[in-house]
Structure formats: C-alpha cells, structure tokens
Amino acid sequence: MMPGNSGLSRRAILVGASGLAVAPALAQTPNPAMEELAAAAARESGPCVWYESSPQEQTDRVIAAFNRRYPSVKMQHIRLIGGVDIAARMVQEARTPGQSADIGSVSADQIWGLNSRNLLAQVDWRRLGASAQQAPVPFTVNIAAAAYVIIYNRNLVPVGAAPGNWDDLLDSRWQGRVGAWLISHPFAQLAKAWGEQRAVEYTERFARLNPMLFRSTFTLAQQVAAGELPIGLGLYHATQPVIARGAPVEMVALEPTVTTSIWTAVARNAPNPNSARLFVSWLLTPEGALAYEEATQRGSALVPGTKTANLLRGKTVVEYGPEETEVFRRHLTRFNEMLKAGGREAG
C-alpha cells in the first residue's frame, strides 16, 4: 500500500555527514572502480546537483547517508515536480549557460527523450557494480519503482465501501469525487496488460467521472487526507507522509499492480561528472537502495531486501520496458488527451 506542492521548490541545501541522524552505514564490499571514482570526485569543486521530485527533507536524508560513506563529496538536491519539468529544465540548460544539473531522476520516457537529444553521459555502469537489470543501457540506470494504489479517506469512505480493484474505481458514486495524476502513466501502462483497446475504454470511462487532476501525487494524497476528495488513484510512496502524520488515509493494492520505474542519468556535460557517477552508482548498492527507500518510500524491486521488492512479490507487475519506450510514449500522448478531456486540473 503506496509526488505536495504543485509548484517549484528550489531550497538548495548542502548536506554533510554531520547534522542529521542517520542509521550507521551498512557493510559494503569495496568496489575498486567506485573507490577510484570517489578519489576523483573528492577533487571536484561541487556541489553535484541532483534534480529529483521528492520533498527536500527526504532527499536530505539520502544525501546524509551518502556522505557517511563519502564525506568529501558535496551534493545539492533541487526539487522539481514531475518528470516533464525535470526533463524540460535539462533541455533548456543544454542550450544556455549557467547552473546546470549533474543528475536527473525521471521516468523512462523522459530519460529516453533526453538521450535522443544526446544530453546524457554514456557510462560503464556494470564496471561500477550495477546489474544488467539495473543498467540495461549505458545512459541510465533503474534506481526504484513507484507503485500505483487506490487511496481513500476512511472518514468519508467506510472500509467495506472502498474500491477494491480497478473496476470499482469506475463506480458512478465517484463522479466528480476522485483524483488522479495529471499525467496518464497508470492508464497507458495498463495497455501492456490488457491490450490497447481495453485500456482505452477504461480510461475513457474514468475520464467521464470528471476526475480532479493533480500535477503532483503528493498533493493528491494531501487532498484526500484533508477530506477534499474521498478517493484517488495515487502512489504508495506519495501517500506515506500523510499516513505517518496520522491522517485517516488507507490504501488498496491493485491487481495487476502498475509501476513506473525511476530512471537516473548523468548529464553529458555535467559540471561534476565523477561525483555524479559515484552518487548514482551508490544508489544501486544495497546501502544506497535502502537509504533511498527509507527516505522516499520508493524502493528498488531489483535489490533484494527492500520493502518494494517485498510489496511486489506475488503481484502481476505491469510496466512497459525500456525497449518499448516509443510504444509507451505514443500511448501516453493519446491517454493524456483522453484524461484531460474529461478531467479538471487542480488549481
């Protein structure tokens, strides 16, 4: 049971090894290539800038854990909401001088789009310890997966009346009372499991409910928590913060479970390329993967021992693979139009 502000948060913070309480670093078998990279990274002036959509307090914890292992490497997180914003920013920066990102974390379609513009570094990730599944191509790696779930406010929806599956989400009682992300990732991904025609029919029916569409699934979770909407198609990780604060929010795991992997890449002209490669490589280790999941609730299904790997065990997991990115992007354009035609964007 699994991104709140729809604007831009640019609180840029350098996080060192001290100042935050973090768990002791996990034992990690030294990788000679990473140790060599760490020495080169320590000589860079930094900070190494990472564009990613999680709230700042979460990425502070990730960077703190990284700095426990590599205290000489300066990192800076800049929060941009949604993969489209991150990719657009990186494209703009490639055209103009000034501050630019070293690292970007977005969905597969955005990463593949950036690569098609020759904006990403080609890296031998396998030499740095990545598995073939984590690094199927040299320009990006899979660091985590976001899983879609139904979320509901139990003060507005009794437990027995909550939607339990995809079909329940289409019930007419949710007319004008359901929320979803503005981008149609979960619906487009369903075409992988159901075939395009069934997924189109489902999305058209959902759009006729006049759903409220949010630029961030963190905002969606907050609105459900506040009782502004009774239910939504949300994300496991984006709902965790409101549950942790005691909000009356519950989640329902779906079958099949639709996921969107988080892909991370180093910019081709990264100002701090060694620091960037080191940080991304560390995210793929058990230590890094667990630190990222502990902070953001988005974990890697490719690293044994994560909560995400456990959550997805036994589920039919649906997601277009990297090699199907062009097919998925065509679906996404079509499904976005359907969703926006019936929905209304949250202000």
Image (spheres, helix red, strand yellow):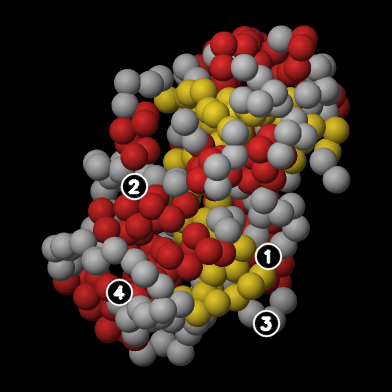
Judge depth for marks 2 and 4 and give the one in front.
4
**Rendered position, 293 above or below 45:** above
**Rendered position, 43 above or below 63:** below
First in residue order: circle 3 vs circle 4: 4
Q: Are marks 2 and 1 in contact (CB under 8 Å)?
A: no
The residue indicated by pointer 3 is 98
First in residue order: circle 2 vs circle 1: 1
First in residue order: circle 3 vs circle 1: 1
The residue indicated by pointer 2 is 134
Q: Amino acid at mark 1?
A: Ser
Q: Report, in whole angstroms, how far the alpha carbon at label 3 lies from the one at label 4.
A: 30 Å
First in residue order: circle 4 vs circle 1: 1
Q: Are marks 2 and 3 in contact (CB under 8 Å)?
A: no
The residue indicated by pointer 4 is 68
Helix, strand or loop for disc 1: strand
Q: Report, in whole angstroms, how far the alpha carbon at label 2 lies from the one at label 1.
A: 29 Å
- How crowded pointer 3 is (Cα within 10 Å; few <14, some 14-19, many 20+) is rated as few
- How crowded pointer 1 is (Cα within 10 Å; few <14, some 14-19, many 20+) is rated as some
Q: Amino acid at mark 3?
A: Gly
**232 relative to 240 in the view: left or right:** right
Helix, strand or loop for disc 3: loop
**56 relative to 217 in the view: left or right:** left
Q: Amino acid at mark 4?
A: Arg
The residue indicated by pointer 1 is 9
**Rendered position, 112 above or below 50:** above
Q: Residue at x 56, y 36 (%)?
A: 235
Judge depth for marks 2 and 1 and give the one in front.
1
